[in-house]
Image (cartoon, coloured by chain):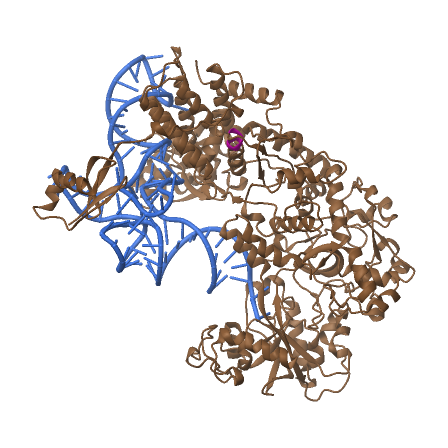
RNA sequence: GCGGGCGUGGCGAAAUUGGCAGACGCACUAGACUUAGGAUCUAGCGCCGCAAGGCAUGUAGGUUCGACUCCUAUCGCCCGCACCA
């Protein structure tokens, strides 16, 4: 009886399906365990062998936990909204719903082939209205909530209006615009529109204008983590800054808790580090300096910047508009260096720039600002030139009254801190280079720690030239400096975050519609002018002038800092006029109107004014519905909850279900979601927790990041020749390839001669004489190469131009070159799991994926090695059945050695599985089978235990043999074997005996031997005697159950 | 530049707490069985050496009776961040 994996696997897959073997109940007395794979996007390309790595690992663990008696939730579904489907629709005219459906089918069949233990009754798709109904519902909860900073949790917006009615917003400063201040009386006096504008500045999901990452080619806005080096992550298209009306999530209010929560979860240090960096919390102070503008009395005129960007109206809020002297606020993490300030630098977009520029410097500043505008994001990132321009103005040092020149330079970013810095060249590298470049004097406040040629960012130096801070160690001076600043009323302690609020809308079709309608009241000019154009008017809104309440807060990258007076500029060449407008009142749909279904469209082009395609749908715009859709991460931010209660049409997830399943115990996925998906879903979870909708505030208890499977490319070497006998022409139609091993003698006369002879023979023409040749390496499909040996016939069929290819072989074979590269269709090094499952079976495939190496490590794929794993399964089979003799297993009682072998295997496999060391798990099973084979053991009692521990790795063969042994129930629920330690107890051990740390001999000694007994035995040993050469040892180290070391 | 990770045979790797380096597998070599072998089995397989033995975990030091493991420096590769004040 042979191991016929094809039939066996088909049979059991069918059986498990019919018996609902993977169905999971929420009602169980067993302890729960939740294993989750990161939500896949079903791409059109299908899976290659790299994709299922994490799925196999989580599947093994889920099956293992089940055998261990847990009620295991292990679901799968599809994050199916997204750009590629829409891009495909644009290119091929196929509706995203259709292509997505096709992709899911392909995906599913590939998954089924590998036999995962998913409960498919719980499958979810983000594109399903019964799913996105609840995405919309959660959005409405976010919209209807604000973050109470005092209580450090999200609260319903009604609680906020109650505060306003009572005390105004004194106790709850506006997170969106700190300049908004009002009393209870004023609040009551505001009209509806004004009230809504104010509330919008508090909501956790809010609408505003801001600079966003706009990708023209994709026609959409991208989140920060979707932009790589100024290009879109998908497709690599250029990304520019553009102002658009956007929805945002106020994730910044959760920054501290997202940071603190990392202490409570089991993620890799690298992952925690990435998230921590992304959040970018820093401590420091904001310091305000008086500014002296020589010769300035006249009202500010239109500056270079505001001319270039008509939308930049924020200047109206800057101090320029008032009659008071201008003041400059900087953010610094090093207030201890206050006396080392030699100049100030403000961002070229800084609102104060026009105001403080002196008449004499005006032309120079205009020229500089124009230069900065001309530089693209990419250029700024690529070449870090030192540039800048003096404004003519001076800041006044608050303690010593010195005049500090104010410069502007692009190295200071408008989006971080206050958009202005105090430059301390002796302690900051960039400041120092700037000072050097412009020949500015450098004050040394750290004495010998500063060598005059290089800044020293130390915190350990004792301060000098620093007035009241003199003699203090810098790190101690920080708090003292802040204290003085606060006392003087010119500075304030300040925590800053690098993270920005998350842009939460896309100008696209294939996403969740926002359950929002826009009401445009009688006061709104937008209404009169734009009708359904929903605030895309190209002219200025009057809101600013009227109320000064700006909704124009923050994109993810460039934030409007009202207090610091930074205004947002725009790159030149963009349409004007969307800055800081209002856009009517956002009215949430009633819960009963959900889901707001995505209407069918035939065309996917942008709306009349650059909105998403929904703006072209009359039935949509007539209802004044929001035309943006939600971004890819909306549906994936809470999906792990839906799996717990997937068919609930009353709630997103019942509290009973989420309390039962709780956190995801094990979450497996790639690192690419480190700062995107993981932060967003952590925030959503905290929000749902705050609002009492779930009982835990971290979604994923343990996160494991699988490594990437790289491709192992194969190359053939085409020989291009010149010479007599028309060889060039001949080899053009009949390409000649040189076996890779022969490259070792490239350039030698031997190879030249070899090629010459070979070509003469190939073309049967003695007139041919090769004068020179070059080799060019070409990628060849790895699937027609066995290890490194090319299948010549398959190669000739691979491409028509190689149909009559000729080969110069070595030892009758064509050997390919190889190189590890990214796995990619383009490099012909992708391998489809389907092919391997067909050839070796799913069990072999699963085990080989694991056998490759540690799950978390990246490693290249080598198909050849799969045969070792396959041989192992066949060897296992032969413990039960012989090809000719048939059944060989018996019910005889096992010997002690056999028990020992099996229990050792059980113990080590369990240990490996528990540690996620699946590669050693597989090798332990191999060792076990090898041992049983050597013992010639075919005993049922032993083999049964082997099968159970094998089940998570190779379920089909385990189930088949389990039944062959006469079992009636499924092995999937068999009890995991208990190790009987008595068989593993040893009475003696073969100790390695080392001389000076080097193993020289071996001695079998009883485990309970004493030091003295051991010393006697060791000294009696012939090998030790030899090494001692008659001397007596200095010392004999004896570590029980480990080793013996004789020190001479 | 900053942060994190990793360097072990021809290859993928193992060594869980500082205790026999290279388990397990691929590839390779020799042999057996066989009509056949891309099946199976047996043996070998880090490097140098006939051997005794020596040398070996990127490199150089250190701690220790003992170091792949800990410490210091250095080189290389991978990942993340990158004017963050």
Is residue B43 found left or right of A688 in the rendered image? left
The residue closer to the viewer here, A800 or A885, is A885
Q: Where does the image place residue A790, in percent across and percent down from the top left?
A: 42, 32
Q: Where does the image place residue A245, in percent across and percent down from the top left?
A: 76, 58
Residue drawn at (22%, 38%), measured in percent from left and top? A1009
Q: Where does the image place residue A293, in percent across and percent down from the top left?
A: 68, 85
The quadrant in which residue A434 appears is: bottom right
Specify the segment rendered in magenta: A63-67
Q: Where does the image place residue A95, in percent across and percent down from the top left?
A: 74, 38
The residue closer to the viewer here, A13 or A759, is A13
The quadrant in which residue A28 appears is: top right
Q: Colour of chain A?
A: brown
The residue closer to the viewer here, A675 or A80, is A675
Q: Is residue A79 visible?
A: no
Q: Colour of chain B?
A: blue
Name the image quarter holding the N terminus of chain A: top left
The residue closer to the viewer here, A946 or A903, is A903
Query: Total number of numbered labels?
Result: 0
Question: Can you say whether A856 is above or below B73 in the image?
Answer: above
Residue farthest left in this picture: A1030
Residue drawn at (49%, 19%), measured in percent from left and top? A960
């Amino acid at each position: 009886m042979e191991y016929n994996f094809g039939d066996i696997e088909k049979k059991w897959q069918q059986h498990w399906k019919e018996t609902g073997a993977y169905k999971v109940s929420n009602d169980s007395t067993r302890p729960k365990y939740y294993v989750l794979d990161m939500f896949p996007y079903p791409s059109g390309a299908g899976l290659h062998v790299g994709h299922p790595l994490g799925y196999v690992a989580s599947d093994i663990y889920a099956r293992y936990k089940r055998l261990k008696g847990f009620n295991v939730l292990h679901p799968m579904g599809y994050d199916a909204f997204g750009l590629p489907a829409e891009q495909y629709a644009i290119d091929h005219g196929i509706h995203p719903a259709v292509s997505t459906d096709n992709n899911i089918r392909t995906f599913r069949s590939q998954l089924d082939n590998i036999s995962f233990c998913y409960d498919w009754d719980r499958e979810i798709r983000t594109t399903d209205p019964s799913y996105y109904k609840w995405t919309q519902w959660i959005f409405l909860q976010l919209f209807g909530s604000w973050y109470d900073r005092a209580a450090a949790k999200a609260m319903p917006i009604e609680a906020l209006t109650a505060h306003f009615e009572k005390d105004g917003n004194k106790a709850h400063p506006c997170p969106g615009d700190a300049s908004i201040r009002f009393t209870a009386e004023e609040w009551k006096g505001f009209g509806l529109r004004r009230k809504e504008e104010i509330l919008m500045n508090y909501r956790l999901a809010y609408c505003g204008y801001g600079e966003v990452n706009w990708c023209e080619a994709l026609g959409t806005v991208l989140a920060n983590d979707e932009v790589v080096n100024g290009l879109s992550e998908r497709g690599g298209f250029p990304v520019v800054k553009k102002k658009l009306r956007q929805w945002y999530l106020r994730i910044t209010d959760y920054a501290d808790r997202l940071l603190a929560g990392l202490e409570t979860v089991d993620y890799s240090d690298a992952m925690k580090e990435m998230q921590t960096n992304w959040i970018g919390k820093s401590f420091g102070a904001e310091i305000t300096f008086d500014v002296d503008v020589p010769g300035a009395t006249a009202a500010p005129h239109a500056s270079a910047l505001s001319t270039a960007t008509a939308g930049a109206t924020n200047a109206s809020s800057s101090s320029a508009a008032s009659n008071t002297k201008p003041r400059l606020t900087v953010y610094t993490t090093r207030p201890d260096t206050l006396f080392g300030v030699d100049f100030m630098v403000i961002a070229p977009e800084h609102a104060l720039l026009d105001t403080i520029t002196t008449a004499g410097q005006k032309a120079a500043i205009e020229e500089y600002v124009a230069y900065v505008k001309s530089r693209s994001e990419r250029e700024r990132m690529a070449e870090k030139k030192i540039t800048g321009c003096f404004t003519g103005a001076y800041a006044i040092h608050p303690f010593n009254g010195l005049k500090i020149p104010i410069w502007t330079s692009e190295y200071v970013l408008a989006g971080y801190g206050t958009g202005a810095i105090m430059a301390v060249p002796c302690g900051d590298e960039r400041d120092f280079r700037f000072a050097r470049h412009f020949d500015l004097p450098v004050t040394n406040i750290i004495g010998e720690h500063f060598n005059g040629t290089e800044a020293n960012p130390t915190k350990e130096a004792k301060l000098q030239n620093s007035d009241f801070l003199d003699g203090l160690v810098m790190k101690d001076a920080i708090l003292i400096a802040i204290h003085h600043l606060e006392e003087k009323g010119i500075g304030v302690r300040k925590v800053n975050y690098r993270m920005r609020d998350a842009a939460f809308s896309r100008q696209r079709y294939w996403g969740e519609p926002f359950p929002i309608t826009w009401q445009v009241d009688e006061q709104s000019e937008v209404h009169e002018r734009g009708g359904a154009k929903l605030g895309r008017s190209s002219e200025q809104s009057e809101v600013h002038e009227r109320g000064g309440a700006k909704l124009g807060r923050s994109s993810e990258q460039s934030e409007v800092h009202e207090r610091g007076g930074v205004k947002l500029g725009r790159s030149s060449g963009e349409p004007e006029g969307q800055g800081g407008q209002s856009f009517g009142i956002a009215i949430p749909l009633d819960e009963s109107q959900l889901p707001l279904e995505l209407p069918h469209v035939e065309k996917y082009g942008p709306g009349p004014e650059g909105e998403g395609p929904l703006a072209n749908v009359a039935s949509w715009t007539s209802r004044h519905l929001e035309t943006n859709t939600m971004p890819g991460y909306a549906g994936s931010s809470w999906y792990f909850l839906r799996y717990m209660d997937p068919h609930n049409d009353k709630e997103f997830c019942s509290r009973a279900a989420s309390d039962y399943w709780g956190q995801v115990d094990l979450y497996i996925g790639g690192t690419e979601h480190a700062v995107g998906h993981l932060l967003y879903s952590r925030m959503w979870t905290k929000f749902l927790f705050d609002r009492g909708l779930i009982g835990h505030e971290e979604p994923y208890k343990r996160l494991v990041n699988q490594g990437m499977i790289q491709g192992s490319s194969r190359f053939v070497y085409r020989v291009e020749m010149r010479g007599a006998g028309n060889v060039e022409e001949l080899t053009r139609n009949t390409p000649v390839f040189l076996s890779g091993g022969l490259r070792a003698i490239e350039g030698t006369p031997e190879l030249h001669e070899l090629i010459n002879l070979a070509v003469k023979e190939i073309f049967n023409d003695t007139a041919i004489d090769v004068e020179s040749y070059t080799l060019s390496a070409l990628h060849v499909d790895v699937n027609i190469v066995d290890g490194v040996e090319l299948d010549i016939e398959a190669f000739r069929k691979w491409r028509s131009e190689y149909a009559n290819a000729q080969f110069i072989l070595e030892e009758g074979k064509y050997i390919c070159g190889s190189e590890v590269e990214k796995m990619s269709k383009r490099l012909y090094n992708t391998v489809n799991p389907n092919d391997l499952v067909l050839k070796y079976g799913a069990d072999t495939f699963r085990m080989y994926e694991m056998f490759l190496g540690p799950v978390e490590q990246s490693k290249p794929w080598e198909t050849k090695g799969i045969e070792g794993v396959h041989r192992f399964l066949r060897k296992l089979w032969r413990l039960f059945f012989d090809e000719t003799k048939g059944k060989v297993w018996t019910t005889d009682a096992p010997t002690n050695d056999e028990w020992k072998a099996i229990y050792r295997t059980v113990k080590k496999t369990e240990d490996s599985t528990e540690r996620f060391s699946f590669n050693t798990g597989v090798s332990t099973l191999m060792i076990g089978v090898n041992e049983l084979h050597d013992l010639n053991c075919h005993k049922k009692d032993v083999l049964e235990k082997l099968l159970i521990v094998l089940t998570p790795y190779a379920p089909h063969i385990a189930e088949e043999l389990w039944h062959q042994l006469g079992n009636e129930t499924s092995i999937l629920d068999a009890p995991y074997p208990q190790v009987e330690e008595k068989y593993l107890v040893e009475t003696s051990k073969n100790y390695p005996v080392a001389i000076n740390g080097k193993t020289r001999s071996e001695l079998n000694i009883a485990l309970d031997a004493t030091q003295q007994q051991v010393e006697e035995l060791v000294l009696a040993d012939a090998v030790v005697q030899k090494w001692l050469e008659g001397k007596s040892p200095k010392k004999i180290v004896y570590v029980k159950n480990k080793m013996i070391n004789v020190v001479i």
